[in-house]
Image (tube, rainbow, N blue to C red):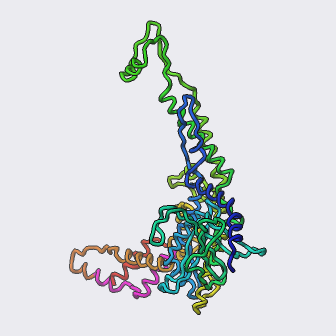
C-alpha cells in the first residue's frame, strides 16, 4: 500500500502537536527549565541568577538505573534464547533497552525499527534501531492496527549528501508499510508534494510494519507531568532567590551622607578602598532582612513533593544511609518506586515480546522456526542491607539445612557447589590442627605411648570423614570434630 502525498501530509499534521509536546519534555529532561529564559531583574536592574536543579532528570534516571542495572534475560528450552543473544550482541540491545526506557520516561514513548539485510553476515542480518518519537508519525486503521509508520528527517544546508554539499535544507521521509519501505524527498517548489527517490521502494518480508512504539504506560505518558514540572520550577525559583539574597548581603549597597566629590574622585576612592567624610558625615550598608530558614524549608518541601509524585525515595533523607539502615526501612522507603517499576516491567516485557516476534518472523522466512515459549527476565534493583540479610539467614540454622540457607543468598549462584567448598575447607582446617602428645622421658615411656596408640580404637577413613561431616552439620562444637580427626591422623 502506497500513501499519496495528501495522506502523508494529513498523517504528519496529526502528529505535529504530540511531537511539540515531546520536544518540550525532552528539553525539560535536558535541563532547559523556565527560569533560564525568565529574564527577571534585581532591584538595581541587574539580571537575576538562574539556577536549575534538575530533579526531573534525577527521577527518570533513578528508574532507568534500577531497571537496567542487569540486562534483560531471555530464557527458553529451544534455540530462541541463543538466537536472541546473537541479535543482542550484533545490535547492542543492552544499550538500546536503556535508551528506550529513558526516552519512554522522559518523552512518553520511544520507537524501535527492524531491518533485514541478506547480504550481511548471519549474525548481523537482523538490524534493530532505537529512535526518539520526535519526527515519527503513525497511521492506524479503525481496529487500532498500525498501517504505516513515517520517519521525517531534516538535512540542513551545507551538509554533505550524494557526492556534494547541499545548498538548501532538504526534508526526507521514510514510510514503512506491511510489505514495503518507501523513500521520499519534499519537492523543492511544491512543499506539499513528496517525490520518490532513486532506489525506492524496497520490499521486506516481515508481513507487518517493522516498526513499533515502545512505552511503559498504556497512554504513552511521560513521568514528567505538569505537576512535577511545577514543583521543579518552584524549587529553581526559591534556590535562585536564596542565592541572590546571599549575594546581595555580600555586596550590599553603600549609602553615604556628608560626602562631596565628583565621579572621578569617587572612582579613585573605590579603587583605594577608603573615603573622607565631612565632620557630621557617615556611611553604612543598606541590608535586607532575609529569613534563610524559610528558603530552606521551601526547598525541602518542593523537593519532597516532586520525589513523592515521581514515587522515588529521597535517599539523602533515609536514616542511616551510611549502611546501617535496616532492611525493612529500605523496603518501605523504596516500596512506592518498586510498585511503579513492577508496572513498568509488565509493559517492558510486552515490548520485548514484540521485538522477538519480529525476529521470529524474519527467521521463519529463512526456514528457521523458533519456539513461542520463553521467559523475559527483568529485575528491579534496590539497595539492601547485605550484612543484616546474612545475619538473618544465619539465624535460620535450626530450621533449614546449610544448603537451603545458601539458596537464600542471591549472590551465590550455585549453593550446592558453595556448600561443597565450605565442607572441604572445614575438613582441611580440622586435619591441620596439630595433635599434642606427651613427651616420653624414658624408653619405657615411649613404648607405652606407642602401645596406647595401637590399642586405641581408630575408625576407618570413610567412617571418620562421615562422622566428622555429621558432627559439622549438626553444629556440634569444633573440639569434638577435632578429637575425632586426631584419632584418624594418629593412625
Q: Is residue 55 visible?
A: yes
Q: Main secondary structure of the magenta part?
A: helix
Q: Inspect the magenta stretch and tell me whether residue 462 lies in it.
A: yes
The residue at the point 59 percent across, 82 percent down is 202
When asked about the image quadrant of residue 400, the answer is bottom right
| For residue 420, side relative to residue 197 (left or right) | left
Give the magenta range. 448-474
> Residue 412, image x and y in percent?
50, 73
When asked about the image quadrant of residue 302, the answer is top right
> Which sits in the foreground, 150 or 51?
150
> Which sits in the foreground, 368 or 207?
207
User: Hey, which residue is sitting farthest bottom in the picture?
Assistant: 367
> Residue 205, image x and y in percent?
62, 85
When asked about the image quadrant of residue 171, the answer is bottom right
Up the image or down, 486 lies above or below 154; here it is below
| For residue 130, side relative to residue 440 (left or right) | right
Amino acid at each position: 500500500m502506497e500513501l499519496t502525498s495528501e495522506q502523508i501530509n494529513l498523517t504528519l499534521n496529526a502528529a505535529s502537536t504530540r511531537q511539540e509536546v515531546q520536544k518540550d519534555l525532552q528539553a525539560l529532561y535536558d535541563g532547559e527549565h523556565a527560569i533560564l529564559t525568565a529574564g527577571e531583574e534585581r532591584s538595581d536592574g541587574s539580571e537575576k541568577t538562574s539556577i536549575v536543579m534538575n530533579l526531573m532528570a534525577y527521577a527518570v534516571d533513578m528508574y532507568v538505573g534500577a531497571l537496567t542495572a542487569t540486562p534483560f534475560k531471555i530464557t527458553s528450552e529451544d534455540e530462541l534464547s541463543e538466537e536472541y543473544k546473537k541479535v543482542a550482541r550484533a545490535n547492542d540491545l543492552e544499550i538500546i533497552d536503556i535508551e528506550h526506557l529513558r526516552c519512554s520516561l522522559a518523552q512518553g514513548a520511544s520507537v524501535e525499527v527492524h531491518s533485514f539485510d541478506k547480504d550481511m553476515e548471519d549474525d548481523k542480518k537482523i538490524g534493530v534501531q532505537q529512535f526518539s518519537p520526535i519526527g515519527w508519525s503513525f497511521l492506524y486503521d479503525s481496529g487500532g492496527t498500525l498501517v504505516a509508520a513515517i520517519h521525517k528527517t531534516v538535512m540542513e544546508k551545507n551538509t554533505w549528501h550524494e557526492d556534494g554539499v547541499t545548498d538548501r535544507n532538504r526534508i526526507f521521509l521514510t514510510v514503512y508499510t506491511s510489505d514495503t519501505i518507501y523513500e521520499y524527498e519534499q519537492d523543492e517548489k511544491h512543499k506539499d508534494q513528496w517525490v520518490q527517490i532513486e532506489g525506492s521502494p524496497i520490499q521486506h518480508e516481515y508481513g507487518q510494519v517493522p516498526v513499533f512504539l515502545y512505552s511503559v504506560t498504556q497512554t504513552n505518558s511521560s513521568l514528567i507531568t505538569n505537576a512535577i514540572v511545577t514543583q521543579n520550577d518552584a524549587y529553581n525559583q526559591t534556590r535562585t532567590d536564596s542565592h541572590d539574597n546571599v549575594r546581595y548581603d555580600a555586596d550590599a549597597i553603600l549609602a553615604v551622607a556628608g560626602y562631596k566629590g565628583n565621579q572621578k574622585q569617587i572612582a579613585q576612592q573605590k579603587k583605594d578602598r577608603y573615603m573622607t567624610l565631612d565632620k557630621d558625615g557617615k556611611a553604612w550598608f543598606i541590608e535586607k532582612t532575609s529569613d534563610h530558614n524559610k528558603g530552606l524549608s521551601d526547598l525541602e518541601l518542593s523537593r519532597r513533593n516532586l520525589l513523592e509524585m515521581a514515587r522515588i525515595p529521597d535517599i539523602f533523607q533515609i536514616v542511616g544511609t551510611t549502611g546501617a539502615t535496616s532492611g525493612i526501612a529500605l523496603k518501605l522507603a523504596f516500596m512506592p518506586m518498586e510498585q511503579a517499576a513492577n508496572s513498568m516491567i509488565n509493559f517492558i516485557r510486552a515490548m520485548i515480546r514484540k521485538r522477538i516476534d519480529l525476529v521470529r518472523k524474519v527467521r521463519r522466512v529463512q526456514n528457521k522456526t523458533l519456539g513461542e515459549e520463553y521467559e523475559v527476565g527483568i529485575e528491579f534493583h534496590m539497595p539492601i542491607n547485605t550484612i543484616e540479610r546474612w545475619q538473618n539467614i544465619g539465624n535460620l540454622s535450626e530450621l533449614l539445612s546449610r544448603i537451603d540457607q545458601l539458596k537464600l543468598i542471591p549472590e551465590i549462584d550455585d549453593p550446592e557447589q558453595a556448600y561443597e567448598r565450605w565442607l572441604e575447607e572445614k575438613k582441611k582446617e580440622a586435619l591441620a590442627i596439630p595433635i599434642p602428645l606427651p613427651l616420653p622421658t624414658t624408653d619405657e615411656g615411649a613404648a607405652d605411648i606407642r602401645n596406647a596408640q595401637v590399642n586405641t580404637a581408630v575408625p576407618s577413613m570413610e567412617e571418620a570423614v562421615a562422622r566428622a561431616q555429621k558432627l559439622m552439620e549438626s553444629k556440634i562444637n569444633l573440639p569434638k570434630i577435632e578429637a575425632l580427626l586426631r584419632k584418624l591422623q594418629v593412625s
